[in-house]
Image (cartoon, rainbow, N blue to C red):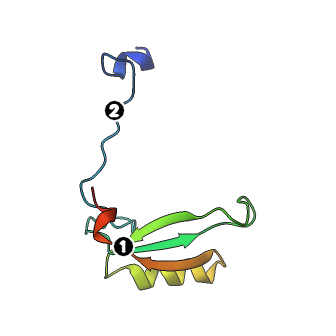
């Protein structure tokens, strides 16, 4: 089997986006309410920001996780426009 046999007819991969942002915490499928911006200075430039999304139950846990590893930069609430 060829990897291209698994693509749709136009040859482009199918990427489905959730209608509502989902929490990044492993195993959680709740709607995200918060964006945690972070970067790893060992591999990212100083201005680069990666984003983890969090539900209200996991925002503090994810922020603490990033802060304890000196990766956290900022926490922002998600606005309704962030949903598709």
Residue 28's x, y, as percent? Answer: 30, 67
Choose between 3 and 37: the one closer to the eye.
Answer: 37
Choose between 69 and 22: the one closer to the eye.
Answer: 22
Q: Is residue 62 visible?
A: no
Q: Quadrant of residue 43?
A: bottom right
Give the Cα distance between marks 1 and 2: 26 Å
State whether residue 38 is above or below residue 4. below
Q: Residues within 10 Å of mark 2 (few under 14, many from 20)?
A: few
Choose between 37 and 24: the one closer to the eye.
Answer: 37
State whether residue 48 is above or below residue 54. above
Q: Secondary structure at mark 2?
A: loop
Residue 49's x, y, as percent? Answer: 59, 64
Q: Quadrant of residue 29?
A: bottom left
Mark positioned earlier in the residue sequence (1 or 2): 2
Q: Secondary structure at mark 1?
A: loop
Q: Given contact means CB atoms under 8 Å apart, are the residues at marks 1 and 2 in contact?
A: no
Between circles 1 and 2, the one closer to the viewer is 1
Marker disc for residue 14? 2
Image quadrant holding the N terminus, namely top left
Q: Residue at x 40, y 80 (%)?
A: 59
Q: Quadrant of residue 5?
A: top left
Q: Residue at x 42, y 17 (%)?
A: 4
Marker disc for residue 78? 1
User: Relative to 7, is 72 on the left or the right?
Assistant: right
């Amino acid at each position: 089997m060829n990897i291209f046999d698994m693509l749709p007819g136009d040859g482009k991969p199918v990427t489905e986006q959730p209608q509502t942002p989902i929490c990044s915490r492993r195993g959680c499928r709740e709607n995200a309410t918060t964006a945690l911006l972070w970067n790893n200075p060992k591999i990212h430039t100083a201005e680069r920001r990666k984003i983890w999304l969090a539900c209200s139950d996991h925002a503090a846990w994810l922020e603490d996780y990033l802060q304890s590893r000196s990766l956290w930069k900022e926490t922002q609430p998600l606005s309704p426009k962030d949903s598709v």
